[in-house]
Image (cartoon, grey):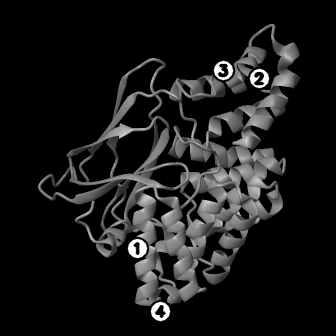
């Protein structure tokens, strides 16, 4: 990475803006050596000679980029020595083509090494996000010294140096208080530290500066949910949804806002769409859908959703945490359903 200049690296990654997930990663405490192998599918099966180059990027639930590689159609990239957890893997091509899906890299208990292989489906050959068709005027007018600070903050973020990233972001804002990118990325660090009020201030400022900033609207909804300002979170997530209606995290955040406002029928619709697009998402739509099923009196449906969740995430650390709830859904255990149901709601809120 040291031989790649910051500017060219930042331009290569079109998803450099930090976007939060509304649920923290469910990571095991296993010290296992984890490896992910990603094989890139062929973009044009009818024209196999037309090879394309792709960027493969892994991101954690806080939006932090943890690994990046470049490869061509049909090739396999390997990411070794990963921490256990649930990650988003994104395949990024030319003309803003991108497709992201989640992968659970939690190994079984006691496993010293763990390897997962995935084939990454290539994105459509069109610009598939409406907000990527436009460029904000403020970004065009951004002074070069501000861009340099953002570049350095981005590289510090990639290397896991939060304090250095924050220093560069604040320096960028000292030079240009209208830099929406800097406000957004600074807000993600406040959110990660649990300072949700400051995070809300930063994300709000970013959305005021750029009404079409998908990342800030999505992040704002996450922070607002964290402080139980659900009506405002719904408004923010609706802005993000209108910009990217097929983004799984946006769908999940929008659904969560509806869920906490007790609009369960609408919430179900968006959770189901999010689950279909990204079944292994660390937003865990199956758990919310199970809760809604119980509210509707559909205990068999809730049982199926929980079974599906643990099929996709068999080694997550919350397995024991939900044991009582799963037992309550079994025949003969329904007298405990009210207590277990309350515990599930509390656990989902905390995540």
Residue 18, above or below 313: below
- Residue tagged by mark 3? 320
Q: Quadrant of residue 349?
A: top right
Are the residues tagged 3 and 2 within 8 Å (C-beta)?
Answer: no
Residue beneath disc 1: 151
Q: CA distance from mark 2 to mark 1?
A: 51 Å
Is there CB contact under 8 Å for labels 1 and 3?
Answer: no
Quadrant hosting residue 344: top right
Q: Secondary structure at mark 4?
A: loop
Q: Earlier in the sequence, mark 3 or mark 2?
A: 2
Disc 1 crowd rating (10 Å Cα; few below 14, some 14-19, many 20+) is: many
Judge whether 350 appears above or below 20 on screen.
Answer: above
| Residue at (54, 34) in percent of width and height | 27
Q: Residues within 10 Å of mark 4 (few under 14, many from 20)?
A: few
Q: Earlier in the sequence, mark 4 or mark 2?
A: 4
Quarter of the image where the N terminus is located: bottom left
- Horizontally, residue 41 falls left or right of residue 221, namely left
Image quadrant occupied by the C terminus: top right
Q: Which mark is residue 122?
A: none
Q: Earlier in the sequence, mark 3 or mark 4?
A: 4
Q: Are marks 2 and 1 in contact (CB under 8 Å)?
A: no
Residue occupied by mark 4: 141
- The residue closer to the viewer here, 28 or 12, is 28
The secondary element bearing badge 2 is classed as helix
Give me the C-alpha separation between circle 3 and circle 2: 20 Å
Residue that appears at 33% across and 35% down: 35
């Amino acid at each position: 990475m040291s031989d790649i200049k910051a500017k060219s690296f930042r331009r290569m990654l079109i998803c450099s803006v930090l976007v939060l997930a509304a649920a923290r990663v469910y990571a095991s405490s296993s010290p296992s050596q984890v490896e992910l192998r990603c094989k890139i599918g062929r973009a044009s099966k009818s024209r196999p000679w037309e090879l394309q180059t792709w960027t493969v990027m892994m991101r954690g639930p806080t939006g932090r980029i943890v690994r990046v590689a470049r490869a061509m159609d049909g090739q396999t990239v390997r990411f070794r020595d990963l921490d256990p957890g649930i990650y988003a893997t994104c395949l990024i091509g030319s003309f803003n083509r991108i497709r992201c899906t989640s992968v659970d890299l939690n190994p079984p208990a006691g496993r010293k090494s763990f390897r997962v292989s995935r084939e990454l489906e290539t994105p459509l050959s069109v610009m598939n996000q409406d907000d990527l068709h436009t460029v904000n005027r403020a970004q065009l007018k951004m002074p070069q010294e501000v861009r340099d600070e953002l570049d350095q903050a981005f590289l510090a973020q990639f290397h896991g140096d939060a304090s250095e990233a924050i220093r560069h972001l604040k320096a960028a804002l000292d030079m240009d208080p209208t830099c929406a990118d800097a406000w957004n990325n600074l807000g993600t660090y406040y959110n990660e530290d649990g300072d949700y009020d400051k995070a809300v201030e930063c994300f709000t400022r970013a959305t005021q500066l750029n009404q079409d900033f998908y990342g800030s609207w999505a992040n704002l909804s996450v922070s607002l949910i964290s402080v139980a300002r659900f009506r405002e979170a719904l408004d923010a997530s609706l802005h993000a949804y209108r910009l990217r209606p097929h983004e799984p995290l946006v769908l999940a955040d929008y659904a969560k806002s509806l869920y906490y406002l007790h609009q369960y029928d609408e919430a179900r619709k968006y959770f189901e769409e999010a689950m279909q697009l990204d079944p292994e998402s660390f937003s865990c739509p199956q758990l919310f859908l199970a809760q809604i099923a119980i509210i509707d009196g559909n205990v068999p449906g809730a049982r199926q959703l929980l079974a599906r969740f643990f099929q996709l995430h068999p080694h997550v650390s919350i397995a024991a945490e939900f044991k009582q709830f799963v037992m309550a859904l079994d025949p003969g255990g329904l007298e405990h359903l009210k207590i277990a149901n309350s515990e599930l709601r509390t656990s989902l809120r905390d995540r």
